[in-house]
Amino acid sequence: MNAYYRKLGLGKNAVVYTDTFSSMVLMVETGIGVAVVPSNLRNRLSTGLCFAELEGPRQQMKFVALCMPDNPNPCAQDFFAFLSRYKKADEMG
């Protein structure tokens, strides 16, 4: 990655890449794959971390929003609900 990205450790197996200036989540890398956060979700995730897993035989994306430890925020469930709606809309398309 270049200087415009910042890597943040998230547990043992995940690395979160954020925009250096805005801290928006751009990409999540896990032990089983890399997930790029769609541009229309990035601004919604700027106050929390997005953790993405690849699951199942078709390797569909599963997004889970987490609050940042140093910024407790009750909106994590709102992120999760928003991402769930996005996943459903994406699968329908």
Image: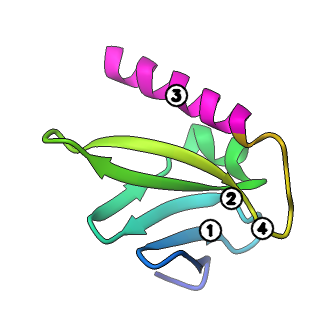
Q: Main secondary structure of the magenta part?
A: helix
Q: Is residue 7 magenta?
A: no
The reply to whether discs 4 and 1 touch (Cβ–Cβ < 8 Å) is no
The reply to whether discs 2 and 4 touch (Cβ–Cβ < 8 Å) is no
- Specify the label residue 28 is tagged with: none
Q: Position of residue 6 (x, y in %)?
A: 61, 79
Residue at 68%, 48% (x, y): give it: 45
Read off the residue under disc 4.
Answer: 69
Read off the residue under disc 1.
Answer: 18
In this view of the protein, which residue sits in the foreground, 85 or 12? 12
Residue 56 visible to the viewer: yes
Q: Amino acid at mark 3?
A: Ser
Q: Disc 4 or 1, which lies upstream in sequence?
A: 1
The reply to whether discs 1 and 2 touch (Cβ–Cβ < 8 Å) is yes
Q: Disc 1 or 2, which lies upstream in sequence?
A: 1
Read off the residue under disc 2.
Answer: 24
Viewer-side label of 1, 3: 3
Q: CA distance from mark 3 to mark 4?
A: 23 Å
- Specify the label residue 84 is tagged with: 3
